[in-house]
Amino acid sequence: MFKALAGICFLHLTTIFFLFWAIIDDAWWFTENLYTDLWGRWVMENNDNVWVYMDIPTSYRKDYLQAVQAFAVLSCLFAVFSLCVFIFQLFTLGKGKRFTISGIVQLISCFCIMVALSVYTDHFHRGEKNGWYGWSYIMAWFGWLLTLFTGIMYIILRKRVD
């Protein structure tokens, strides 16, 4: 039982790590001379291999950008809260009960990161043909997959005492 709980906690911590790293790191979109994330843009000036931080362009709709930022941050917060609820439920649930609250909170985290990624995919970099999505964007999708998996797992999982 201890190995299973350690594995579940490790999987959940991995999920939180993916979400935080994806949101904090600056690699959501790349071109040859710029890279961008949810918070700013770095541009190479004069081919001197010097990267300069710039604000997100005004061509990006501010309401969409703020929605992506808000849902991404909410996803991280709900994932951390879900882990706290899971640990709390370990000590308070009776034998045979399900970790439903932990699962629902984790699925809310999954929904939040899915909304953030969907809005980002649909509204940003549409006309830019010479760029590609970076590893932070891909890690955010892996984070979504892990939050979905752990959320469903928590709902199905029953507490048992050996």
Image (cartoon, rainbow, N blue to C red):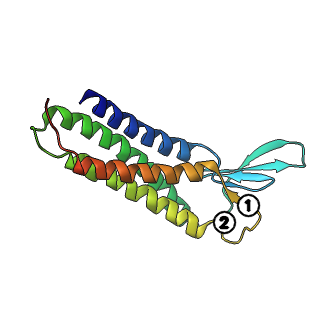
Asked whether residue 105 is in view, the answer is no
x then y, percent, for residue 126? 66, 70
Q: Depth check: give the residue in front, 92 or 6.
A: 6
Q: Residue furthest bottom?
A: 127
Q: Quadrant of residue 52?
A: top right
Say what secondary structure mark 2 lies in.
Answer: loop
Amino acid carrying label 2: it is: His
Amino acid carrying label 1: it is: Gly
Quadrant location, the N terminus: top left
x then y, percent, for residue 33? 81, 53
**Picture disc at residue 125:** 2
Q: Depth check: give the residue in front, 158 or 61.
A: 158
**Whole-Å distance between the Cαs marked 1 and 2?**
8 Å
Identify the residue at horizontal 41%, vertical 36% (top origin): 13
x then y, percent, for residue 155? 24, 51
Asked whether residue 24 is in view, the answer is yes
Q: Position of 112 compared to 52: left or right?
A: left
Asked if the residue under mark 2 is in contact with the one under mark 1, i.e. CB atoms within 8 Å, the reply is yes
Say what secondary structure mark 1 lies in.
Answer: loop
Specify which label sits upstream in the sequence, 1 or 2. 2
Q: Position of 11 compared to 28: left or right?
A: left
Identify the residue at horizontal 48%, vertical 39% (top origin): 17
Mark 2 is surrounded, within 10 Å at the Cα level, by few (under 14), some (14 to 19) or many (20 or more) other residues, namely some
Q: Quadrant of residue 60?
A: bottom right
Find disc 1 in the rendering and name its residue.
131
33 to 160, vertically: above or below: below
Identify the residue at horizontal 67%, vertical 67% (top origin): 59
